[in-house]
Structures are given as structure tokens and as C-alpha cells.
Amino acid sequence: MKLLALMKKEFLRFFRDPRLIITMLLPGILIYVIYTLMGSLMNDEPKYDFKVLLLEKSEKVVSLTEEQIGKIDGMTIEFETTEEGEEAASEKVNNGEATALVVFTPDFDNAVAAYDPFSGDPAPAVKIYYRSGDGESEAFYNLFAGILDGYANKFNVLPISDPSDMAVDIMSGLLPFIVVIMIFSSCMSVTLESVAGEKERGTLATILVTSAKRSHIALGKILPLSCISSIGALSSFLGIALSMPKLMGTSLGVLGGYSFLSYFMIFLLVVGIVPLIVSLISVVSTFSRSVKEASAYTSILMILSLVLSIAVNFISGIGNWVVAIPILNAVVAMNQVFTHTAPVWLPFTAFAVNLVYTALLVFAVAKMLSSERIMFGK
């Protein structure tokens, strides 16, 4: 019951202050407005007539693609089966004679139907040659990748584009960075006052002299603050989800080239780092003697996290070991989800790892609350 009373106190502190509520909702609104404006300026209602070359063929995928793109105003598609080799056909794409080249595994539809993901055998593959620097070719890839995600999750999509154009990689690197900024800001606005503020006002000492367990006090602050900060995380997620189709120059009908699973993994990663950041700021707030001191320490942590978050997306050769690093694992996983290269296990593992770090930080806060030297400077 004491835990519930502590949690209620934190919730009331938030919901009685309209400024804090606005602070939570503002990140998602800003993301939506900024990305939608960027999408409008970059895409401005494109009208594309896709001419796509095929090596081998999937009747089901071709039919589904024609149906989906046929629903989009200003876009048409024409598939042409070519007898040329893969190299010659891809050269036509590079020269602009075709929008893209799609290479299916032989007998693709039957191979997908018969494939067992747990067999250890290579999955059926789809190679997509396209020009990432060309709006039409890139729009086709985003549309087609989303359609393939909806068709089946059993095969590998292998995008092949001009390596000299880094526009897609840069955008997928910036999105997770901006999300971390928004979440960190939301968590700071509600968490800094949680311990350091009560230290200054003397109200924390009143709680500590009660029979409430230190673990309950820690949970009574971190759990509600995480729930409150999740409002900001949800706002940021919705801002991304709603603006992504416009930003990528595609249609809501195919979710901007991303499947439901992709959106769910992004949401899971965003939600997973909220309690981690709240717990991290709570540790700093508990250690500090004032809100001003806590704010200074947290700013250093925020800058460090942001620098690493943007740097890690432009360092090649990062292995799966990054999943063990808090916050960065979510950034790398989001980047790979945005570029359709994330293995399914990575986002879920990153989410679980961040929860483990959160539990350790909660334990650290409880121990710090038991220290008279930290709490009262003795």
C-alpha cells in the first residue's frame, strides 16, 4: 500500500501541472510537423511511371504489386521479363532505362510456401537493383519492400543500389538520433525534480523516516515517472509513424514501405529505453544535492548519449555485440529497422537488455536512498 501511495503522489505531481503535460506531448507534435514539412518539400506529390525488369518471376508478388500501386494516384507500373543476364539488366537500371530490376529465386512462390525458417536452409531471396539517388527508383523500392513484407516474412530482400548516394543511410541514421533527443528531453523534464527537488525542499527526509522500504521508494518514483515519460515516447512514436509515409514519398496504403512488424519493433525500442533513461536520471538526481547540480550532470550524460547515438550509425562494421550496450542497442536496432536490414531477434533482445539495465539502476537508487552520506551529506 505504501508503494501505491508513493506512486500516486508522483502521478498527482505530474497531472496537476499542465506545463508538464504539454512537455510530454510536444516532441511527437514537433516530429510530425517537421518530418511532414520535410516530406512535402522533398516529394511534392510525385507522379511516377515505374518500368521494372524481372529476372525469373513471382505471379503472386507481381499481381499484388500491380494491385497496390494501381490504388495510388499518379503512379503506374509496368513489369517486363528480360532474357538478359543480371549484369546487363542491372546496367539498364544504372543508365536510367528502367526504374529497377527485381531478381527472384527460381520457382519463388513455391519456394516461399515450402520454406521452413527453422530448417537452417538458405531462405528464398529477392534482389532489388535500384538507384537510391533517383526519386522514382527509390520510391519503387520503398513501395515494393513494403509489399514484400506483407506477402511473407520467410525470404531475404537484398536491396542493391548506387553506393555513392548515402541519402537513405543518412536519414535512417538521423531518425533514431532525433528520437533519443526527444525521449531524453521528456524524461529530464519530469525526473530531475523527483529526488533532487525533494532533497532541496526537505520532503524526501520525511519519506525516508517512515517504515517504507527503500526499494519501494525507488519503485514509487521510477515506475510512475516511466509511465509519464512513456506519454512522450508514445507521442514521438506516433509522430514518426504518421509522418514517415510523407517523408519517404510513399502512400499510407503500404505504410511507407514498412510492415506492421517494423512499426511494432520501433515502438518496442522506444518504449524500452524510456524506463532506462528515467532510471539513469534518477540515479543522478539521487546523487545530486540540488536540481541545478542534477541538471548539470544529466546534461553531460545527454550529450554523451547523443554523440554516441549519431556516431554509431556512421561507423561501419559494428557487430552484434552492440546489443549489450544500453541505449546504443536501441539506436542501432532502429537504424536497421528503418533500412529493412534488422534481424527480428535484435530489437527484441535490445528491449530485454535495456529492461535488465533498468532493474540494476532501480536497485542502485534503492541503495543510494539508504546511504546517509548521499542523502544528507553525512
Image (spheres, rainbow, N blue to C red):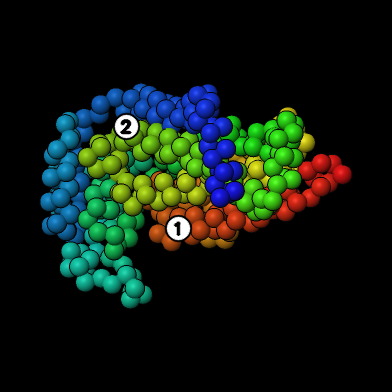
Query: Which of pointers 2 and 1 indicates the residue nearer the eye?
Result: 1
Q: Position of residue 62 (x, y in %)?
A: 15, 52
Residue 287 as seen in the image, left or right of residue 218: right
Amino acid type, callout 1: Phe
Q: Position of residue 118 (x, y in %)?
A: 34, 73
Q: Do the numbered discs 2 and 1 sit on residues whose CB atoms are within 8 Å?
A: no
Secondary structure beneath dot 1 equals helix
In front of the other: 51 or 228: 228
First reached walking from the N terminus: tag 2 or tag 1: 2
* Image quarter in which the C terminus is found: top right
Above-or-below relation of 157 to 71:
below
Q: Which residue is mark 2?
A: 246
At horizontal 21% and vertical 30% (from top left) the residue drawn is 47
Can see residue 352?
yes
Amino acid type, callout 2: Lys
In front of the other: 127 or 95: 127
At horizontal 71% and vertical 35% (from top left) the residue drawn is 203
Above-or-below relation of 105 to 223:
below
**Quarter holding residue 44:** top left
Q: Which mark is residue 181?
A: none
Secondary structure beneath dot 2 equals helix
In front of the other: 26 or 303: 26
Q: Which residue is mark 1?
A: 348
